[in-house]
């Protein structure tokens, strides 16, 4: 008897592959949905659709693990990829890990199957994770293998009676987790098409956000946010509240041209209200407590980490090395940051920390005793000395 395990979201791409697998001779199809913060209705819908199609379904609640071990790490790395906080990519390693656990527990399986297309990034991320954890199980990608377009998938689903939510008129492809929400497909693929308000679920339009600014205070302990507005919360609850506060004020809408791993440019829309708020606060506090040299080097570390995370290489040796450096920095990232939220804008208005390297006495223009300006004369004369010599040689 042939058995397959489908990494299942309940969406179009993963739903159509269940009847495909049965047509290809798989006698038993299992599905696993990993809950990393999708709407409860989506989790329930995935279980319902799997049952309709005769699959053996498993749901794994990984929200706390995702918040604690993935989102907070991404925040500590100020994880940004060309203008948006990494969200979809950081969930894929955890989804692959949990799917592998199911494969080991309920196997043996003849294949682990995903619904990624050949044009996206997730094929790399999921397959790396699966090969990392269950290298002995073959991987199948039916949508990629058949070179299907989204319209062709819909036609096939209608033909075999597979339950899907898309239609040829409303074809948004949505991926959502605790840290962010991505929307693509349909007319959003046109770079000059203004996104309709209907695609947004987490953020108010800045035009309709509250008319009064809102202050949010974020408390950090060793690089990890532990309280919002004085309320101590676990990571899952804190991120959820940050999403609500920032989204209510129109924070976190991103419309960008993204460079995918295979080289193509795509137009993407994101909603990342909580991530935008927390990364901004963290980066501000980090800049307050580290030296200038550390700050410059950490920016390089953050960029390299984001590249690896975008590619799904969670656990790569360099990935772990970069996190180790960041962990050393985070020991001092303790304190508070004040932010003002207003109609889509996010402004830092204050920061404090016992590890702050700022000295008002040294920095003040009104203090002449702590730091003697005259001591700078020799240093200023030496500034750019080699450049001055070069300029004379050019003459």
Image: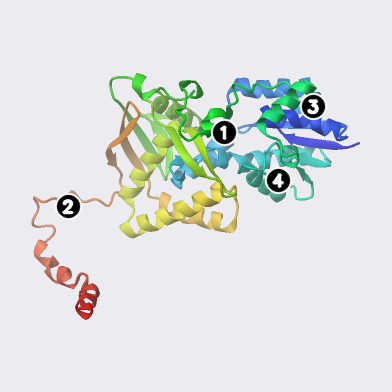
Question: How many residues crowd around disc 2 within 10 Å: few (fewer than 14), some, or many (20 or more)?
Answer: few
Question: As rendered, which of 77 and 219 lies closer to the eye?
Answer: 77
Query: Is disc 4 placed on a helix, strand or loop?
Result: helix
Query: Is disc 2 placed on a helix, strand or loop?
Result: helix
Name the mark nearer the viewer: 3 or 1. 3
Which residue is the site of mark 4? 130
Answer with mark 3 or mark 2, whichever residue precedes in sequence.
Answer: 3
Disc 4 to disc 1, how far (Cα)? Answer: 21 Å
Where the C terminus falls, by quadrant?
A: bottom left
Which residue is the site of mark 2? 363
Residue at 24% across, 73% down: 387
Disc 3 to disc 2, how far (Cα)? Answer: 67 Å
Which residue is the site of mark 3? 55
Can the viewer see residue 9?
A: no
Which residue is the site of mark 1? 64
Residue at 54% across, 34% down: 189
When asked about the image quadrant of residue 385, the answer is: bottom left
Is the residue 390 above or below the residue 321 in the image?
Answer: below
Question: How many residues crowd around disc 3 within 10 Å: few (fewer than 14), some, or many (20 or more)?
Answer: many
Is the residue 42 above or below the residue 104 in the image?
Answer: above
Q: Residue 36 appears at what percent x and percent y?
A: 59, 32
């Amino acid at each position: 008897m042939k058995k397959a395990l489908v990494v299942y979201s309940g969406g179009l791409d993963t739903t159509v592959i269940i009847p495909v697998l049965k047509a290809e001779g798989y006698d038993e199809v299992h599905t696993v949905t990993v809950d990393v913060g999708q709407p409860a209705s989506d989790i329930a819908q995935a279980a319902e659709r799997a049952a309709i199609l005769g699959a053996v379904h498993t749901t794994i609640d990984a929200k706390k693990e995702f918040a604690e071990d993935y989102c907070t790490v991404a925040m500590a790395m100020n994880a940004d990829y060309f203008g948006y906080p990494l969200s979809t990519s950081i969930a894929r390693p955890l989804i692959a890990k949990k799917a592998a656990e199911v494969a080991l527990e309920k196997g043996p399986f003849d294949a682990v199957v995903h619904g990624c297309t050949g044009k996206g990034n997730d094929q790399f991320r999921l397959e790396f994770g699966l090969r990392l954890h269950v290298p002995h199980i073959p991987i199948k990608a039916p949508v990629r293998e058949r070179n299907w377009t989204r319209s062709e998938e819909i036609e096939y689903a209608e033909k075999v009676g597979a339950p899907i939510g898309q239609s040829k008129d409303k074809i948004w492809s949505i991926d959502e987790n605790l840290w962010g929400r991505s929307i693509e497909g349909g007319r959003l693929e046109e770079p000059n098409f203004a996104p309709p308000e209907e695609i947004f679920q987490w953020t108010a339009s800045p035009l309709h956000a509250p008319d009064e600014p809102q202050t949010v205070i974020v408390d950090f302990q060793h690089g990890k946010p532990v309280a919002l507005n004085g309320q101590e919360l676990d990571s899952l609850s804190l991120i959820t509240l940050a999403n609500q506060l920032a989204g209510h004020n129109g924070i976190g809408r991103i419309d960008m041209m993204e460079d995918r791993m295979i080289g193509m440019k795509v137009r993407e829309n994101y909603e990342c209200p909580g991530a935008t708020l927390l990364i901004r606060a963290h980066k501000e506090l980090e800049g307050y407590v580290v030296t200038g040299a550390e700050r410059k080097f950490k920016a390089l570390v953050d960029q390299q980490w984001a590249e690896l995370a975008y590619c799904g290489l969670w656990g790569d040796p360099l990935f772990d090395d970069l996190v180790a450096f960041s962990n050393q920095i985070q020991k001092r990232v303790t304190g508070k940051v004040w932010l003002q939220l207003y109609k889509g804008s996010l402004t830092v208005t204050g920061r404090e920390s016992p590890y702050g390297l700022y000295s008002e006495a040294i920095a003040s223009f009104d203090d002449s005793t702590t730091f003697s300006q005259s001591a700078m004369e020799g240093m200023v004369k030496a500034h750019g000395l080699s450049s001055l010599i070069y300029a004379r040689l050019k003459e």
